[in-house]
Image (cartoon, coloured by chain):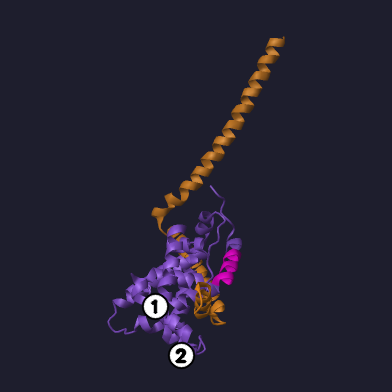
């Protein structure tokens, strides 16, 4: 059985982890929920959850990077966030317009029509395809990391990414039907 | 758009990483410290409550009793070994005579 680390050491290591990955988790959260307020909340909840299970995750990771584990926590929390929100009839936010809305209002794409079309296309993809693209292009994760975050095999992730890019390209070029088939 | 590589670079540009607010780190650290403090308070409260309830005394006393028994057993073994060694020395003395 592995010896338990002193608490100070664990806290230092956790501090290093969140400093290294705060931007990743925040970016993922932002593209998932579509606004800064919820993204901050989701990021904070992700790290609180991670802190609770950090020692075990370190033990079980076997030296592998913990970024996919963090993103998986964020992914599960975001899923719960949407599930809870869908139970509340008073909230009326249209998920499908969030990505393009946040980019147009906050000038992240600096008015470039092509990039706007791409973001609108990303919104039309299925959940897994959209998430895989966020992980690859916003966070720069490789296939293996994305596979771990999504709980898939490396091969299945490679196919998922390939199809996501192809479908998106089709949507942006205007031949969506062809790609979807 | 000329090719797959061009499209992927556009995609990378469209999905650029988002900088978290500057004070998020500070707020996160405050939240984690609060959780730590809550855990410490909870543990202290639980210990005090356990001590106040006589039904828990046996539970608390059990590890102490186990420690006492273990220490006693250790002492017993040392005494037994000494006694055996003393008996052996006495026997050797008798045989030498």
- Specify the subunit that label 2 lies on: A
**B71, above or below A55, in the image:** above
Queried whether the magenta region covers residue A112, the answer comes back as no
Residue drawn at the location 49% of the way across and 63% of the way down: A69
Pick whichever, B50 or A28, lies toward us. A28
Give the orange chain's letter: B
Colour of chain A in the rendered structure image: purple
Look at the image and tell me whether residue B75 can be seen: yes
The numbered mark at residue A171 is: 1
Q: Residues within 10 Å of mark 2 (few under 14, many from 20)?
A: few
Please identify the quarter of the rendering in which residue A5 is found.
Answer: bottom right
Asked whether, in this view, residue A143 is left or right of residue A15, the answer is left
Of the 4 image quadrants, the one containing the C terminus of chain A is bottom left
Q: Which residue is mark 2?
A: A105
Q: Residue furthest front?
A: B2
Instruction: Write down the region rendered in magenta.
Output: A11-21
């Amino acid at each position: 059985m592995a010896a338990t680390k002193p608490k100070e050491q664990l806290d230092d290591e956790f501090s290093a982890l969140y400093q290294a990955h705060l931007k990743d988790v925040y970016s993922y959260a932002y593209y998932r929920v579509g606004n800064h307020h919820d993204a901050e909340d989701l990021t904070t909840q992700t790290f609180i959850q991670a802190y609770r299970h950090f020692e075990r995750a370190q033990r079980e990771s076997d030296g592998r990077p913990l970024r996919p584990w963090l993103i998986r926590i964020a992914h599960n929390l975001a899923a719960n966030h949407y599930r809870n929100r869908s139970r509340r009839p008073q909230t009326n936010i249209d998920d499908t317009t969030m990505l393009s809305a946040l980019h147009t209002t906050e000038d992240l794409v600096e008015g470039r029509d092509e990039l706007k079309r791409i973001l609108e296309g990303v919104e039309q993809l299925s959940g897994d395809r959209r998430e895989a693209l966020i992980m690859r292009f916003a966070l720069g994760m490789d296939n293996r990391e994305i596979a771990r975050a999504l709980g898939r095999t490396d091969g299945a992730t490679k196919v998922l990414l390939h199809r996501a890019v192809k479908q998106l390209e089709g949507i942006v070029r205007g031949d969506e039907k062809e790609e979807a088939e | 758009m000329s090719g797959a590589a061009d499209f992927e670079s556009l995609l990378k540009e469209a999905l650029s990483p988002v900088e978290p607010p500057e004070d998020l780190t500070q707020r996160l650290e405050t939240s984690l410290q609060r959780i730590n403090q809550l855990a410490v308070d909870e543990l202290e409260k639980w210990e005090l409550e356990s001590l106040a309830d006589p039904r828990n005394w046996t539970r608390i006393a059990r590890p102490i009793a186990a420690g006492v028994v273990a220490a006693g057993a250790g002492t017993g073994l040392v005494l037994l070994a000494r006694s055996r060694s003393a008996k052996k020395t006495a026997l050797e003395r008798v045989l030498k005579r």
